[in-house]
Amino acid sequence: MGILEIKGVNKRFGGLQALGDVNLSVAEGSCHAIIGPNGAGKSTLLNCLVGKLIPDTGSVTFEGKSLLGRKPHEINQMGISRVFQTPEIFGDLTVMENMLIPCFARRDGSFRMHAYETITDERAIIEEAEEMLDEVHMLDKRDMHAASLSRGDKRRLEMAMCLVQQPKLLLLDEPTAGMARADTNNTIELLKQIRQKRNLTMAIIEHDMHVVFSLADRVTVLAQGTPLVEDTPEKIKGNPKVREAYLGEAHV
Amino acid sequence: MLGLKKSDLRLYLIVLALLIFAPFLLNPFPDTSGLAQFNAGYPDLMQKLIIFGLFAVGFNILFGLTGYLSFGHAAFLGVGSYAGVWMFKLLTMNVVPALIVSTLTAGVFALLIGFISLRRSGIYFSILTLAFAQMSYSLAYSVLTPITGGETGLQLSLDDPRIIGISRTESGNIPVPHFFGLEMNSATTIDFGAWSFTFSAGYYFAAVIFAVAFFLTIRLFRSPFGLMLRAVKSNQSRMSYTGLNSRPYALAAFVISGMYAGLAGGLMVAMDPLAGAERMLWTASGEVVLMTILGGAGTLIGPVLGAGVIAYLESIISTINENVLHQWFGGLPDWAENTLVTVVEPFVGEGWHLTLGAVFMLVVIFLPGGIVQAGRLIARFFRRNRGEVGALSGEPERRPGE
């Protein structure tokens, strides 16, 4: 039994079968990559996990509890955090404030009227946020407006915001999309470090095979909404079916 | 002190000083001089400044922090006024129960309207609140006449069944709202040379209420709750994927700002126990939006400044008429006098809205951050090297970790 179990999931958008009978099991502590050509249904699948979409049929369970019908904030409170393809951060706020929000969310739950407390009195929370910022090497940018950060920094901030919640499962949607090679390598190193430090399960959607093969323990190849094969990265590399699915794509 | 950071404490102390010395500060011109009509230090206007300041401060908690633009906040002001007058009629002329009931009634009303309106965001939210406020206005004007007094408004009468206290005074008048005996319309005038300063009990009572409300607002701005409200404005999607439910946060902000509006309505009737439906009209809702934007939405002091400027313009500019203009320009040759009077006249008296519109346009175009931004620019100009800009202007917390 994996920490995340996806069974028989189907999702249609009008005439388009976005997901067809997807079965997937993510083992606790592993890094599971989901790859596939454009339009294979990778993002749809991820959206079904975080409550943004509800599958037509099938079941999604996390630690034995069903995720279907739960709101995004409820799913997050169960221990699932998500990094988006385009970083979703609080642009109007400073880097530090961006970090404090998930810290408070973890401590206080999805809603609390703490209107008479003062943020500056919350030493423990502030230290926690600072430590995490330090871990992603962004402590020197704590007072900058998040919107003015570079794209790579925005991504690192978003990742730090997810990690500071100490999730059990981290979902990454193309964490290196649009990054230069050096940035990509930095991100890979960061994710490796994070995995070493914490017993974190990761599910990662990625186009870049370099990233997949550096990080993943298991790889599922999705094509036209259906899992094609699931195996270790080494075996996936040599699989002719995968080559076929990716025919014409430069990465392989 | 008081759990405030140094810069916030300084801002708060400045506001307190302004409140205490307002009767002097707003009366800078001797009574005998021609400029005396620019004096604002009389009780009616000072009370109005305070009450609209309170209204705008509350509105800013919703609009400035969460970004939800309500076009129906005057409804809560109106509800608060009606509730206050009913307390005077039924219970006692003491203002304390009236203010409490005004605030709570507006809060319940805001909970109801907010619960429905917050199902939508952006322009749809604004239209929903506008629709609710106009509905409230129409109801108060027609169907609910037994409760609201309809066209004439709700006022006290000589045969009110007041449970605590008397229905009429010994001299046969309607009693005056009071705070444990201190009558709201009592005032002392001190003459000082050519100046005369009026100290009104009503004004100082309202000022104390305002000081408490403003203190609570600062605390709210610096609290984790305030941070969450700003998160609502910034990115609701990220908020939900961070495990936060944005709906109750927005609703809480809506109810809190509705309660501030109700309190302001209650204060209005405490100063002058008369409530009319026109207080709920959409123009009144629009006015508080103007005040907040003019002063600087999302800042602590901005709405107060905006409310002050608008209430002042309304009261002072609207009293200037053609005769006054002729007096001002009397020293000039006739042709110059007449030309100037013709040019200036549309902007004064009845035409004060034109002045307001022009000021508003100038501010929005050149200072999108409102009066507070102007203050910030001036502050930066004077202490460019000290890196302290924004402390006085009540800029939202930039360094929560410090």
Image (cartoon, coloured by chain):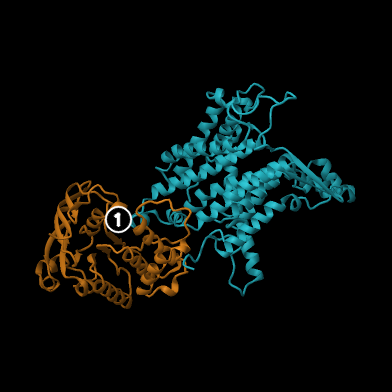
Chain colours: A orange, B cyan
On the image, the x and y values in percent for residue A41 come to 21, 57
Tell me if I can see residue A15 in this picture.
Answer: yes
* Quadrant assignment for the N terminus of chain B: bottom right
On the image, the x and y values in percent for residue B50 come to 65, 46
On the image, the x and y values in percent for residue B303 come to 59, 51
Q: Quadrant of residue B392?
A: bottom right
User: Residue sitting at 58 percent across and 51 percent down?
Assistant: B214
Q: Quadrant of residue B161?
A: top right
Q: How many marks can you see?
A: 1
The relative height of residue B211 versus residue B175 in the rendered view (above or below) is: below
The relative height of residue A189 versus residue B309 in the rendered view (above or below) is: below
To which residue does mark 1 refer?
A77
Residue situated in front as seen by the camera: B162 or B46 = B162
Density class for disc 1 (Cα within 10 Å; few <14, some 14-19, many ≥20) is many
Output the chain of dot 1.
A
Tell me if I can see residue B292 in this picture.
Answer: no
On the image, the x and y values in percent for residue B104 come to 51, 38
Amino acid, disc 1: Gln
